[in-house]
Amino acid sequence: MISSSPATGILDRLGKASSAEEFFSLLGVEYDPKIVNVARLHILKRMGQYLAQEKFAGAAEPEIRTRCKAMLERAYGDFVASSPIDERVFKVLKDAVSDSKKAAAFVPLSELK
């Protein structure tokens, strides 16, 4: 379990979290274990995408915590309303869609030896 020392910032504690459940616990976000069991990596990846768009420089710790909580709630909400397949957070899932739109390679029988 992660120490919740007040001297350690929330971003540091999130960086040391070892499970999705720890993220939810640290930020005080309620969740359905059934959804987290299916989409834990997708939720955390999406939260990371949201975090990457944020600028925390100069922000006070309570504001950072509030914004992180909102991002986790938003990421979690994405997968409550949809599925990992529909959201396609990971490259392999994105590529599966783009590959299906490519024309299938056609090799005429006359070309086969």
Image (tube, grey):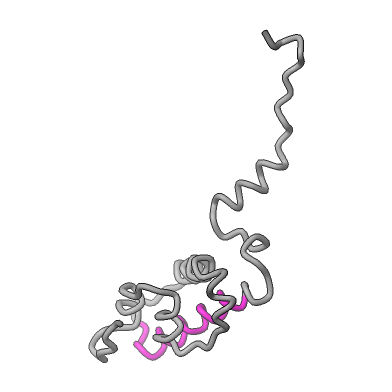
What x and y, as percent, mark residue 65?
41, 86
**8 or 52, which lies in front?**
8
Q: Residue at x 61, y 51 (%)?
A: 94
What residue range appears in magenta?
59-77
Q: Quadrant of the N terminus?
A: bottom left
113 displayed left or right of 76: right
What x and y, as percent, mark residue 95?
60, 46
Q: Quadrant of residue 13?
A: bottom left
Q: Residue at x 70, y 37 (%)?
A: 102
Q: Residue at x 54, y 51 (%)?
A: 91
88 displayed left or right of 26: right
Q: Is residue 26 above or below residue 101?
A: below
Q: Quadrant of residue 36?
A: bottom right
What x and y, as percent, mark residue 60?
35, 87
Q: Is residue 105 above or below residue 39?
A: above
The prevailing secondary structure element of the residues shown in magenta is helix
Q: Residue at x 64, y 77 (%)?
A: 80
Q: Is residue 113 above or below residue 21?
A: above
80 displayed left or right of 56: right
**34 or 56, which lies in front?**
34
Q: Quadrant of the C terminus?
A: top right
Q: Is residue 74 magenta?
A: yes
What x and y, as percent, mark residue 37?
53, 73
Q: Is residue 60 magenta?
A: yes
Count of all numbered marks drawn on residues in the image? 0
Q: Is residue 70 above or below residue 78?
A: below
